[in-house]
Every structure is written in structure tokens, then in C-alpha cells.
């Protein structure tokens, strides 16, 4: 077995395993940390798929940004000290049935479809090409996404400040 | 050169509008320098364009366009068209606009919505330039409406005044009547020729295609498009809005309601001139003539300085329309240009007078005396020399005294009507033309003498009057210079040798031969043969009008009151503006009331009668069906209701208000659908 | 690709993504805590991204797939920021972030 094969199975296992821990853990802080490993595993899978830039972005944005945000959310909304870190599951049986159903359906669909696979030359570095694309064909979505981020930031700040204003009014 | 420059000219005022509306208030001096400077730049560019275009001595038409909307096989484009007509009009619009911007710095000083005023001026200039530059009748309609809205905004600039906001509404609504007709006309053309561009429409017509295959529809399309011009150019019977529009600031009246927007109607007729049939042109000529006569008679009796000018504007626009109608194309358009200069000057002069009167009245703390009423003026000559002398030049020009620009164009129009009558015997048109020429000279000098000469009604007011500041007198001087003959032709007694006549040539008619008006060579020959007579007559009549005004108002040899008494019902009718407003009120406003009442009567007697009659019959049936109802139907109904109730209760369990449950349902259904269809 | 069934190919990645997706769905459906639901959404987005990038590696899609993946990440960041702001607001309003207690729309 080649090294890449081993690595693939290793990281697939890390990803799926920690995702499962995330979902089934009773403690939300544990879940958040499990999510971190999942995201790192996905980043590793990206590297296996020759997407080095995306892997870096994944680490930066998800692990460095979104995860921190989520942790902040956990901290800011916890009512008691330890009690509320517990997460309670609802709809357990129908939810698991549907999840399993979806997984089965998707895997069935993926495996039975005859994909036209074309062998792409192994890339060493995608950053240059991605940069060219971003400034060329994708310039419009690029700008649009920039505007979207700006709006999201302004919106988030606005909502949070109104929140604190409300609190002052209440207190 | 002819592609980029017009676009820059068009977009500069729009840029000024955007800047002024958003940041105007934050700029130093509230940004008047910015708006004025941009307009002046536009003027310079337009002059450059005019010189290159006309200087090239070609009648070429430059168009460039791109596709805007593609609907099936039909394409709607946006584009510009530069011919000599557009190039000249461009300079007229930008020139008057620049001067009005400049004048407003003085006139509007300290106004509460100062920067917004300049923003609207920019919007207006943009839309007006759009009308001038477009090669496409749909786009022209768009700009046409934009001009209407900016006119609405500017008339209603002092909207705290009830009369101003009413006037703005009236102008807008009356214009809409005309625009409605115009839109129908445009649609007739579009349905028949699948294109909005002038070029394509004209090509189709000259290739022998007719709307719906009949000549009548072509005439109808022409007249309907002309109805847009009736509204915008304040022609009979839609002229009622223009005098009321004087509620706006006076520089606005000069720009919009004297020089440019109202001339847009004339410009429109000039644009579509080739496709107008002889019948349509006849309608146009008579509408113009009637307008000119009616407005001139009303102008004699008015005492508000701006109202007199407003009616004189209507009358002069009637002149232009009449000129186009009889085929004196160049003369009509030339009158538009010369009129723009001297009428804008007259309005700005009136603005200067009103400004001075206001200041004087303000000093006296007199808020009841009307600053616009010429009976309160008189003797202003010594106090306001610049305004006086420039106003004199404008008055001479509009009266058609030789050596002025007005003489050149008016003389050509009169010769045109005379020639028209020699060709096909419509003697009423030249008769009205000459009468109006005399009336114009009379009422303009009446206004002039009452304002500047004679004794003042109130010494105190006169004592407080001082000449307006430089920003207001310089535009007056520029316009006065432009009201002299040598800008248009070096021969003071005939325009036909000047550059204007070689630049603007009447386009060849493209309608089927039978429907064509008299061809240009025939018409030109007739004009040359009557030109001298027309000139002599017009000078005599103008001088007679001036002389009469002098006798009545300066020397007081003839009493104006006696004259009015002799004229009897004519005077009464004219003072009351021939009762147009009253008639419209009766016919349209009361008319709808009458229809309403009739419908109400119909409703109360006939429909109610039927209903009541039916009711007695129904009662009979009711007692029968009542039994069925209580026993059978109610049972069914109650049964349905309780079933629905139970079902509702059952279903409301599903609506838990929990997002996750909903999502569960959604995904479950999705899964089922996938399994079913894969 | 002349390979055994164990060697990682397109299908292997797709299966991983499918499993990740269903785990995400599981989290979204079964957790009371809004933040857990958000984490589930992140899982779903990641699984979609794996799909996109796998296709970009193994088919004609080439770099376009990576590009779309990049945009997904950016939008996920925006979504997380706004969603957490909403969560804070919800918490302020209802004093809870348990989804099953937020049922104003109950019929």
C-alpha cells in the first residue's frame, strides 16, 4: 500500500470519527473540539486532492475563525456553569432513520453512477492558477463575495450592538 | 468625436445631479459653484461639438447605438444621433442652462433648499440633453417623462405654498394627457415597423410600408405623436398648465418654461417631420395658429409680469408649431433658437425686477404688495439701467423689429405662412400670423412701458429698488448680445443667406407621394416671391403695435380703460383667459360629478327597484326553501364544519413551531421522493 | 486507474463526504442547542466542499471546482458570523437557545 492510501484512510477515519464524536457527545465543548479535528481532517483530505491553497484556507477560516466564533457563542449563551454544556437530543429515532436513509441513498447514488474520470496531471502548486482565475474569470463573484462579507460584518455588528443597547435599556 | 463627446455632454449634468443631491449640502457655498461649473463645461463641449459639426458643412447624421433589450426578433436599442439640428439644440440647452445656473446664484441666495434646487436643475439638463441626443423614439419618451418630472419638482420647489404644489400637479397631469397620446403614437409605429429608432422607422416608411397598411393610420400616428408636443409645448387645448407653472422660481421659468422644455415639443415635431403627412401638418399648423392667437389676446390683459411672459411664450411656441406645420421648417426651428435666447432673457430680466422689488418691499416690511404685479412697478428705468437696456433689446427682438434675431426668424415664418396660403389658399394662417405679430409688439411694449417707464405707483417702493448683483446682470448681457442679428446671419434683413439656413435644411418628406406636403422647391419659390411683401408688412405691423403701445401707455393719448370698454366681451374673455380653466373645470371635473350622480340615480331607482322587486319574489321562495334549509342543508353544513374542525385540530399537531420538526418532515419527504424517482 | 478497490479514488472521497453529510443532518435534526445545529451546518458545508474538490481532482472540472469550494468557505464564514449574531439576539429575547423551546409559531 502506498503512503497516500494509508494517509487517506487515516484522515478519513479522523474526520468521520471526530464528526461522530461531535454529533453524539453530550458536552457541547467536547463537540466543538471534535469539530476542530473534523475540520483539520477535511483540510488533510484537501491536501490529498492537490488543493493545497484550499487546505490552508480551510485551516485559517474554519479552525481559526468559525470555530472560535462558535466557542464564543457557546460561552456567551451558557446560562449556568456546567449544567448547560450538556446537549440534549430530540427526535432521536426519526432523525437517525433519516440520516441513515440519506447516507444510504447518497452512497448508492455515488457508487452506481458511472463518472467520467479524467486523469489530471499532479499539481504541485495551485495558488498561482487560482489567483489568475480569481482576478480573471471569477472577478465578478470575487467582488460580490467581498461585498457579502462586508454586509455580513456590518449586519453582525449591528445586531450585537442593538443587543447591548437593549440590555442597557433593560437594566 | 461624435460618439464620445455627446455621451460626456449627456452624462456631466447627471453627475452634477448625483453629486448635488447627495453631498450638495456639505460642500462650501452649498455646491452652487460645482453645478454651475459642470454646466459651463458642458456648454464648452457643446460649442466645440457644434463648431466641428456645422463647420464640416455636411448634412451627415452620426449615430451609434447598442442593443438594450432583445425581445424575440425585436430589438430595442439605446443610441445617440448627432445631426445639425441636435448640435444646435445642444448649444441652446446648455447655454440657457448655464446662464440660468449663474443667475440663480443671485436669485436663489439663501433659499432653504438651495442645493436641491441645483440638483434638480442638473437632472433637468440631463433629461433635456437626452431628448436632444437620442436616436430612438422610446428613449426620447423616457427622457420626455424625466423632463416632465424635473419640471414638476422645480415648479413645486416652494411646495409650502399651496398654489405652487397645485401648479406642479396641474402641469404634470395636463402633460400626461398629451403624453398618453404620444405613447399610443409610438406604439402604432413600433407595432408596424418593429423598431423605435427614427432611422429604421423612416426607412420603412420610405420603402412604402404603412402602419396597418393604410394612409389614415400614418396621419393618425403623426397627430398622436404631435399630441405629446401639444402637452409639452403648451399648445391649445393643453396650454393651461404653463401660466400656472410660473409659480416656480423665475430662473426655472426661464430655463424650462421658456427656452428649453417647452421647445422640446417643437424639437419633437422637427424630428419626426419627414413622416408627417400633409393632413397631419395641416392639423399642426392650425393648432399652432389658434394657440398663437389665443395666447396673444390673453397676454394683453394680464398684469402679472410673469403671466404676460408665460402667455407670450405660449403664443411664440404656437408660432413655431405653425411654421413647422406650413413647411417653414428652418424658420420654425430658427425661431426656437432665437426665442430661447430672448425669452430666457425676458424671464431673467423679469426675475431681476422681481428680485429688486422683493428686496425693496422687504425693506419696507410690506408683505401684501405683489412684487410681480406690473401696476406696482413703473419708473424702474433709472434704478436698474442694465436690466432696463437688456430688457429693451429682448422686447425689440420678440416684437420683430429689424436688426434683432427675432426679426429674422419671425419674418421667415410669416413669409412661410404667406407662401403656404398662395400654394393652397389657407389665407387664415397668414392672417393670424400677422395679427399675432402686431399683438405681440403691443403687449410686450405695454409690459415694458408699465414696468420701466412712467410714474411709479408707490415712491417708497421705488426708493428701495437697486440694480441686481453682477451674477444676475451678466447672464442678461450675454443673452442680449445673442438676441442681435449677426449671430444668425450677416444680412439683417434675411436669414436665408446665413449659416443657420445652410446648416438646417428641411428634410425630404418620405410619406407616399399623394400624402406629401408641397415639395421644398415649390415652397421655396413661393417664399421667395412673397418674401419682400412679408418683410415690409411685418415691419409695418410690428412698428404699428409698438406705436400703439406708446400712445396708450407712455403718452396716455388713448385710455386703456376706454379701449377695454370698447372691446367689450373680447376684453372680458381675454382677461379671464377665455375661460379655459373654467371650461375644463365644468367639463372634466363637474362632468365626472354629473356622471357620478347619474350613476347614483340609476343605482337608487332602477337597480334598487329591480332588487326590491326581486326581494318580494325571493321572500316567497325563501319560506319554502327555509324549511329545506333548516332540515337538510344545515345538517350537511354543520357536518362539513365539524369535519373540517376535527381535521384542523388533527393537522395542528404537526405545526409544532419547532424548526427541527419541520426540517424532519422536509427531509423525509425529500427522501421519499428520491426513492420514488430514482 | 488500474488499481485495487482500496486505493483511494473518486468514489472513496464521495463516500466520506456522504457520511459526513448524514452526520451533519443528524446534528441539525436532533440537537436542541442552536449552536450544535450550526456546527451540523458546518459539517454539511464541508461535505459539499469535499465533493466539489474531489470532482475537481478527478474530472474535467479542474480548478473551477476548487474555486467554488473557496467561495463556499467564504460564504460559510459570513454565514457563521451572521448566524451567531442571530443566536445572541435569540438568546437575549427568549433567554434560551434550545430550539424546541422557541416555538412562537406553534399552531
Image: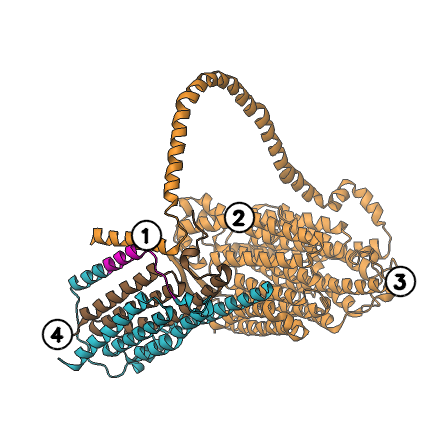
Chain colours: A cyan, B orange, C brown
Residue B439 x, y percent position in the rendering: 73, 52
Mark 2 and mark 4 in contact (Cβ < 8 Å)? Answer: no
Residue bearing the label numbered 2: B180
Left-right relation of B458 to A4 = right
Residue drawn at x 60%, y 69% is B20
Over which residues does the magenta segment extend? A86-102
Q: Which mark is residue B460?
A: 3
Mark 3 and mark 1 in contact (Cβ < 8 Å)? Answer: no
- In space, the residues marked 4 and 3 are separated at their CA atoms by 107 Å
Residue bearing the label numbered 4: C1
Q: Which of the two residues, B624 or C97, is positioned nearer the viewer here?
A: C97
> In the image, which is nearer the foreground, mark 4 or mark 3?
4
Circle count:
4
Residue B435 vs B356, above or below: the answer is above
Residue B419 visible in this rendered orientation of the protein = no
Residue bearing the label numbered 1: B665
How would you classify the magenta stretch by its main secondary structure? Answer: helix
Amino acid at each position: 500500500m502506498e503512503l497516500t492510501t494509508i494517509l487517506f484512510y487515516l484522515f478519513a477515519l479522523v474526520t468521520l470519527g471526530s464528526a461522530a464524536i461531535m454529533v453524539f457527545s453530550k458536552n457541547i465543548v467536547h463537540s466543538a473540539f471534535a469539530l476542530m479535528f473534523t475540520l483539520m481532517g477535511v483540510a488533510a483530505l484537501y491536501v490529498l486532492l492537490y488543493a493545497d491553497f484550499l487546505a490552508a484556507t480551510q485551516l485559517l477560516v474554519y479552525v481559526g475563525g468559525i470555530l472560535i466564533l462558535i466557542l464564543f457563542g457557546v460561552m456567551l449563551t451558557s446560562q449556568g456553569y456546567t449544567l448547560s454544556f450538556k446537549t440534549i437530543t430530540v427526535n432521536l429515532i426519526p432523525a437517525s432513520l433519516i440520516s441513515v436513509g440519506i447516507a444510504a441513498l447518497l452512497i448508492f447514488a455515488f457508487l452506481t453512477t458511472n463518472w467520467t474520470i479524467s486523469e489530471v496531471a499532479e499539481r504541485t502548486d495551485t495558488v498561482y492558477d487560482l489567483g489568475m482565475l480569481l482576478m480573471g474569470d471569477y472577478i465578478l463573484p470575487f467582488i460580490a463575495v467581498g461585498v457579502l462579507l462586508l454586509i455580513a460584518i456590518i449586519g453582525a455588528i449591528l445586531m450585537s450592538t442593538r443587543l447591548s443597547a437593549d440590555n442597557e435599556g433593560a437594566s | 468625436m461624435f460618439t464620445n463627446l455627446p455621451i460626456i455632454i449627456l452624462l456631466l449634468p447627471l453627475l452634477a445631479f448625483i453629486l448635488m443631491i447627495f453631498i450638495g449640502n456639505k460642500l462650501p457655498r452649498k455646491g452652487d459653484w460645482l453645478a454651475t461649473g459642470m454646466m459651463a463645461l458642458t456648454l464648452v463641449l457643446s460649442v466645440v461639438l457644434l463648431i466641428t459639426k456645422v463647420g464640416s458643412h455636411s448634412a451627415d447624421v452620426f449615430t451609434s447605438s447598442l442593443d438594450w433589450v432583445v425581445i424575440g426578433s425585436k430589438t430595442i436599442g439605446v443610441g445617440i444621433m448627432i445631426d445639425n439640428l441636435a448640435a444646435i439644440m445642444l448649444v441652446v440647452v446648455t447655454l440657457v442652462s448655464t446662464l440660468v445656473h449663474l443667475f440663480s446664484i443671485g436669485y436663489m441666495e439663501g433659499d432653504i433648499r438651495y442645493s436641491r434646487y441645483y440638483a434638480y436643475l442638473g437632472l433637468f439638463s440631463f433629461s433635456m440633453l437626452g431628448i436632444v441626443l437620442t436616436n430612438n423614439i422610446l428613449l426620447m419618451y423616457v427622457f420626455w417623462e424625466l423632463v416632465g418630472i424635473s419640471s414638476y419638482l422645480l415648479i413645486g420647489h416652494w411646495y409650502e405654498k399651496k398654489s405652487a404644489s397645485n401648479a406642479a400637479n396641474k402641469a404634470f397631469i395636463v402633460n400626461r394627457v398629451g403624453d398618453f397620446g404620444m405613447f399610443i403614437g409610438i406604439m402604432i409605429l413600433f407595432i408596424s415597423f418593429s423598431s423605435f429608432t427614427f432611422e429604421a422607422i423612416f426607412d420603412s416608411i420610405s420603402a412604402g410600408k404603412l402602419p396597418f397598411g393604410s394612409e389614415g393610420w400614418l396621419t393618425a400616428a403623426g397627430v398622436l405623436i404631435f399630441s405629446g408636443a401639444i402637452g409639452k409645448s403648451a399648445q391649445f387645448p393643453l396650454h393651461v398648465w404653463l401660466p400656472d407653472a410660473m409659480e416656480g422660481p423665475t430662473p426655472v421659468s426661464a430655463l424650462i418654461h421658456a427656452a428649453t422644455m417647452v421647445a422640446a415639443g417643437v424639437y419633437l415635431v422637427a424630428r419626426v417631420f419627414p413622416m408627417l403627412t400633409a393632413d397631419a401638418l395641416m392639423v399642426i399648423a392650425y393648432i399652432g395658429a389658434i394657440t398663437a392667437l389665443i395666447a396673444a389676446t390673453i397676454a394683453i390683459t394680464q398684469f402679472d409680469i410673469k403671466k404676460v411672459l408665460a402667455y407670450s411664450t405660449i403664443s411664440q411656441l404656437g408660432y413655431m408649431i405653425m411654421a413647422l406645420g406650413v413647411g417653414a421648417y428652418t424658420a420654425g426651428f430658427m425661431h426656437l433658437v432665437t426665442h430661447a435666447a430672448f425669452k430666457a432673457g425676458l424671464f431673467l430680466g423679469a426675475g431681476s425686477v422681481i428680485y429688486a422689488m422683493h428686496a425693496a418691499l422687504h425693506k419696507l416690511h410690506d408683505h401684501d404688495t405683489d412684487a410681480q404685479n406690473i401696476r406696482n412697478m413703473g419708473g424702474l428705468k433709472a434704478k436698474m439701467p442694465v436690466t432696463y437696456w437688456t430688457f429693451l433689446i429682448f422686447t425689440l427682438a420678440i416684437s420683430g423689429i429689424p436688426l434683432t434675431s427675432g426679426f429674422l426668424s419671425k419674418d421667415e415664418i410669416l413669409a412661410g405662412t404667406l407662401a403656404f396660403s398662395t400654394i393652397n389658399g389657407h389665407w387664415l394662417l397668414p392672417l393670424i400670423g400677422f395679427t399675432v405679430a402686431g399683438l405681440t409688439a403691443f403687449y410686450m411694449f405695454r409690459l415694458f412701458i408699465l414696468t420701466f417707464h412712467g410714474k411709479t405707483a408707490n415712491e417708497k417702493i421705488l426708493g428701495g429698488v437697486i440694480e441686481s448683483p453682477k451674477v444676475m446682470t451678466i447672464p442678461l448681457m450675454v443673452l442680449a448680445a445673442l438676441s442681435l442679428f449677426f449671430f444668425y446671419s450677416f444680412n439683417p434683413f434675411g436669414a436665408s443667406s446665413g449659416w443657420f439656413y445652410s446648416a438646417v435644411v428641411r428634410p425630404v418628406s418620405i410619406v407616399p407621394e399623394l400624402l406629401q406636403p408641397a415639395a421644398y422647391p415649390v415652397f421655396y419659390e413661393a417664399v421667395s416671391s412673397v418674401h419682400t411683401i412679408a418683410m415690409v408688412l411685418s415691419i409695418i405691423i410690428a412698428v404699428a403695435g409698438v406705436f400703439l403701445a406708446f400712445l396708450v401707455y407712455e403718452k396716455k393719448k388713448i385710455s386703456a380703460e376706454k379701449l377695454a370698454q370698447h372691446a367689450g366681451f373680447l376684453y372680458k374673455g381675454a382677461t379671464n383667459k377665455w375661460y379655459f380653466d373654467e371650461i375644463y373645470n365644468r367639463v372634466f371635473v363637474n362632468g365626472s360629478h354629473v356622471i357620478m350622480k347619474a350613476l347614483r340615480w340609476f343605482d337608487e331607482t332602477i337597480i334598487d327597484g329591480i332588487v326590491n322587486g326581486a326581494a318580494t319574489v325571493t321572500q316567497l321562495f325563501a319560506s319554502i326553501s327555509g324549511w329545506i334549509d333548516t332540515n337538510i342543508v344545515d345538517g350537511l353544513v354543520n357536518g362539513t364544519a365539524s369535519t373540517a374542525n376535527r381535521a384542523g385540530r388533527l393537522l395542528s399537531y404537526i405545526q409544532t413551531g419547532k424548526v427541527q420538526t419541520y426540517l424532519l418532515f422536509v427531509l423525509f419527504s425529500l427522501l421519499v421522493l428520491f426513492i420514488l424517482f430514482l | 486507474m488500474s488499481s485495487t478497490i482500496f486505493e483511494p479514488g473518486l468514489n472513496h472521497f464521495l463516500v466520506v463526504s456522504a457520511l459526513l453529510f448524514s452526520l451533519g443532518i443528524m446534528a441539525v435534526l436532533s440537537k436542541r442547542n442552536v449552536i450544535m445545529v450550526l456546527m451540523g451546518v458546518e459539517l454539511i458545508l464541508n461535505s459539499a466542499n469535499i465533493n466539489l474538490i474531489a470532482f475537481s481532482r478527478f474530472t474535467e472540472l479542474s480548478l473551477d471546482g476548487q474555486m467554488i469550494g473557496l467561495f463556499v468557505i467564504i460564504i460559510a464564514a459570513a454565514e457563521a458570523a451572521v448566524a451567531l449574531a442571530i443566536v445572541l439576539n435569540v438568546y437575549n429575547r427568549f433567554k434560551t437557545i434550545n430550539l424546541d423551546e422557541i416555538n412562537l409559531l406553534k399552531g
